Amino acid sequence: MQNEIDIVRRERKHTRRSIFFLFLFSFLSLSLSLIYNINNIGDKDFYTYLAILVVIILSTMLVGKITKADNILLMIVNMLFSIGVAMIYRLDPGYGMRQLQFYLVGIVLFFLTFFILKVFRFWDKIGLFYVIVSIGLFLATLVFGTYIGGAKNWIVIGNRITIQPSEFIKVPLAFFIAYFYANYNKISSKPFGRYYMNFMIYVFIGFLFLQKDLGTALIFFGTMILAQFVYEKDRFLIALNIIAMIVGSILAYFMFGHVRIRVATWLDPWSDMDVTGYQITQALFATASGGLFGTGIGLGSPDKIPVAESDFIFSAIAEEMGIFMGIAVVLLYMILVYRAFKISLTQQDKFFSIVAFCIGVLFGLQTFIILGGVLKIIPLTGVTLPFISQGGSSMISGFILLGCLQYCATEIKYGDEIDE
């Protein structure tokens, strides 16, 4: 018993050391970005930068106070954010300023989500609520949405505020899957109850097809199938869903012209480098030209890549910060997904165990899909790189999911007896 206690204490010591270095890296990234842009920013931007540095310090301390669980989650995200905002500010100071503001909103919602989950305890009993919220957001997008980049997945308010509802639907999606499998015996005893989750998620994907938001549809489909792979006993149903995903992809190819263009660009971008293949070829050139250590912030040409601050920010990072930084970004996402799966395996409450698993899958799939598209492994779908790409909806929804994951980790009681 004493040996086990010593092992846990050593692990905690290593964890605290890792948290310190993660915090130091985040602090230095933002500080270097501030120093680089010091001649290009106004007083408002300067004080916002300082405020973010203070928020990173205080949020790290606060997470350590409210939970003895997985404190490293927020630090991983802070590292990803620091890398992203440094590059976004280099590309466009206006976008960089907005990204700093989105972070402030996101960190507030992170703690707010944590405390809401902690106060209320009925989350495994309101499956219909998750469906209603999701469908309501889908209908709002269809009625008030605007086409941007070939997909009708944005609601524009005024001239400055744009909201992507599908990003926020990821939260009720994770909770709905958890509700279904946490109450599987009860739901499956009803007529066609075992197909309830399948049917509702197909409705969600149908809405996404109407919006032509196929990247998010792929994330939803993949999350459902991976959840079924872990929790579903009927393997034939999983096989049918995989076949349906393949058929849906083929239908999307013939139904939507922009999908055919993206597939053709993926297969041979060099045949039309000046038009359809321009974006991906410039991204590949940028990734290759950075070498191992990069050209240095401000010394490359990532501004030649269209939408570099959003869809292709990984290429900009690889060019000016190097392949090593690109590998570090991938490893940070792997650690984040690993921690989510570890929380899922350790969590004794089945509902929150499944929530943690689904959140890990959502982060992992989204990262793989966008990195795969940027590196020409798969056709580009236009989703964002979590916590790095410019965008308020992605940043805020990501912090809400992170708050849910932090709560799932906090409720694990393992190891508490050591502090007693």
Image (cartoon, grey):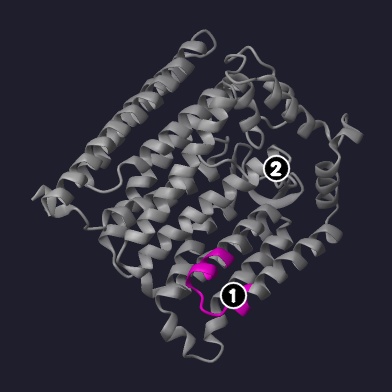
**Label 2 residue SS:** helix
Q: Residue 199: in sight, yes or no?
A: no
Residue 82 is situated, as x and y percent measured from the top left of the image, at: 46, 28
Q: Is residue 413 above or below residue 56?
A: below
**Label 1 residue SS:** helix
- Residue, disc 2: 373
Q: CA distance from mark 2 to mark 1?
A: 27 Å
Q: Is residue 229 magenta?
A: yes
Q: Is residue 189 magenta?
A: no
Which residue is farthest front?
Answer: 3
Quadrant in the picture for residue 307: top right
| Residue in view at x 73 percent, y 47 percent | 378
- Three-letter amino acid code at the position of disc 1: Asn
- Residue, disc 1: 198
Quadrant in the picture for residue 293: top right
**Mark 2 or mark 1: whose residue is earlier in sequence:** 1
Q: Residues within 10 Å of mark 1 (few under 14, many from 20)?
A: some
Residue 176 is situated, as x and y percent measured from the top left of the image, at: 48, 68
Residue 193 is situated, as x and y percent measured from the top left of the image, at: 52, 85
Left or right of 271 in this view: 140: left
The foreground one among 286 and 56 is: 286
Q: Which residues are magenta?
A: 225-238
Which residue is farthest left?
Answer: 420
Left or right of 149 in this view: 107: left
Q: Is residue 397 above or below residue 290?
A: below
- Dominant SS type (magenta): helix
- Three-letter amino acid code at the position of disc 2: Gly
